[in-house]
């Protein structure tokens, strides 16, 4: 039948679409999904043609697509993709079928009363009701060979499987195998148009006629065969798609980089501690004339990298002495914040220097210095001291 041949040809065209898949995408590995992910439901309508096993040697002289062999079916399936390239589905189909009769079963119906003449039998057919159920393995070759691409339009999916069929009219069951090609045209993330063509091969008496003529024959003529073309829809349910497998090398490199940063911080802290150990704590006696030499030198308060909390509270010992001097003499104090220029952006370093100055000024207020006696400055990122970690600081000094 022309409709059937056109459907087969249209299904074959998808091979070209598969080969010409030019959507931009990146190949990458995907993680195994959960059991409830990537399920789908399929509904469709089929047109099938039936070639009976008992026709062998009878020279029926009829094309497989002739109308007397064909009928319409409905189909439904449920399945799941376990990887982008491998899936399973259970498919049921059926309603009506037709088979070509022989003289081995006298109750078959021959609409034109044809009989065997000179060893040849004219065509005749008999309708019957049936259903089939198959489990099938799906192979998405588009994803297997081109890599998973969630934006691909065409997916080319051969399949193979087996199952059981029942001829309800003749009250017979039969085992069988099937193969085919499923083509999916994605209309959205959830819905795809199906164009499918396949071949099912059932036991020789599935059509209700014993295959007596074909004793000893193999292949096509030894079984009942059904060719079909189908159009339908795939509806994806639940979570759809696949997550990218984490890049272990990139994660490892990130951890190594962080570890190196922490080691650098530790080395800077060790250097700061060694330096602080060499500094002798100074106290101020405001009545001592030597205090003028002390207050003329800025006092430093140090901070950790990218932090605004004071690293060592002992840095506040000399700040308190200077605060006491300022209160006794009603002096003005200048608090200057810094950040090291080797790390961070200029904008970030400017913010750090402002916050560090605010933090030390706040400590002075807690020590009893009036806010109107404190002036603040922020220098941003600088490179003044060595090691440069010493530039992560705020200084306090007496000003006019």
Image (cartoon, grey):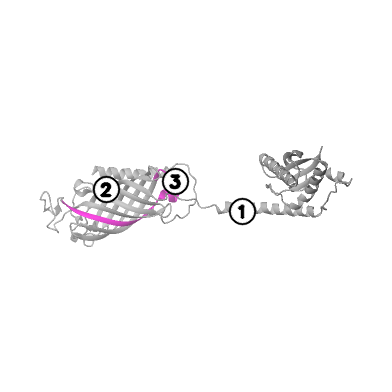
Distance in Å between CA atoms under marks 1 and 2: 57 Å
Picture disc at residue 46:
2
Considering depth in this image, is 227 or 382 the residue closer to the camera? 382
Secondary structure at numbered mark 2: strand
Q: Residue furthest top?
A: 400
Distance in Å between CA atoms under marks 3 and 1: 30 Å
* Left/right of residue 23 with respect to residue 276 in the rendered view: left
Answer with mark 3 or mark 1, whichever residue precedes in sequence: 3
Secondary structure at numbered mark 3: loop
* Residue 79 position by quadrant: bottom left
* Left/right of residue 55 with respect to residue 195 in the rendered view: left
Count of numbered circles in the view: 3
Residue found at x 15% / y 56%: 102
Secondary structure at numbered mark 1: helix
Query: Which quadrant is home to the N terminus?
Result: top left
Q: Residue furthest left?
A: 113
Q: Is residue 326 magenta?
A: no
Considering depth in this image, is 222 or 319 the residue closer to the camera? 319
Local packing at callout 3 (Cα closer than 10 Å; few below 14, some 14-19, many 20+) is some
Q: Do we see residue 217 in this rendering?
A: no
Considering depth in this image, is 234 or 22 the residue closer to the camera? 234
Mark 1 or mark 2, which is nearer to you? Answer: 1
Disc 1 designates what residue?
255
Q: Position of residue 111 (x, y in %)?
A: 12, 49
């Amino acid at each position: 039948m022309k409709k059937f041949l056109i459907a087969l040809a249209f299904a074959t065209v998808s091979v070209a679409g598969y080969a010409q898949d030019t959507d931009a995408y990146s190949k990458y590995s995907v993680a195994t999904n959960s059991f409830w992910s990537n399920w789908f439901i399929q509904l469709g309508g089929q047109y099938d043609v039936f070639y009976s096993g008992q026709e062998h040697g009878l020279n029926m002289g009829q094309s497989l697509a002739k109308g007397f062999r064909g009928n319409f079916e409905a189909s439904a399936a449920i399945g799941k993709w376990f990887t982008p390239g491998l899936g399973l589905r259970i498919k049921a189909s059926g309603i009506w079928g037709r088979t070509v009769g022989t003289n081995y079963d006298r109750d078959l119906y021959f609409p034109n009363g044809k009989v065997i003449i000179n060893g040849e039998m004219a065509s005749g057919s008999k309708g019957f009701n049936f259903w089939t159920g198959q489990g099938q393995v799906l192979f998405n070759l588009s994803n297997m060979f081109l890599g998973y691409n969630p934006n691909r339009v065409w997916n080319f999916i051969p399949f193979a499987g087996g199952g059981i069929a029942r001829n309800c009219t003749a009250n017979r069951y039969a085992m069988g195998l099937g193969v085919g090609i499923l083509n999916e045209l994605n209309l959205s993330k959830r819905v795809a148009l199906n164009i499918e063509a396949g071949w099912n091969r059932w036991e020789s008496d599935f059509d209700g006629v014993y295959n007596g003529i074909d004793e000893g024959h193999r292949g096509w003529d030894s079984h009942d065969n059904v060719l079909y073309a189908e159009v339908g829809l795939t509806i994806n349910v639940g979570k759809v798609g696949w997550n990218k497998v984490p890049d272990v090398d990139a994660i490892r490199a990130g951890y190594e980089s962080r570890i190196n940063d922490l080691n650098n911080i530790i080395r800077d802290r060790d250097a700061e501690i060694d330096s602080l150990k060499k500094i002798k704590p100074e106290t101020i006696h405001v009545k001592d004339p030597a205090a003028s030499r002390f207050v003329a030198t800025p006092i430093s308060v140090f901070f950790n990298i990218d932090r605004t909390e004071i690293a060592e509270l002992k840095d506040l010992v000399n700040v308190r002495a200077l605060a006491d001097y300022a209160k006794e003499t009603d002096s003005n104090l200048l608090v200057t914040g810094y950040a090291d220029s080797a790390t961070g952006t200029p904008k970030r370093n400017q913010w750090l220097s402002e916050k560090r100055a605010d933090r030390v000024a706040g400590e002075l207020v807690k020590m009893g210095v009036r806010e109107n006696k404190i002036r603040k400055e922020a220098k941003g990122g600088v490179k003044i001291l060595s090691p440069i970690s010493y530039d992560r600081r705020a200084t306090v000094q007496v000003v006019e």
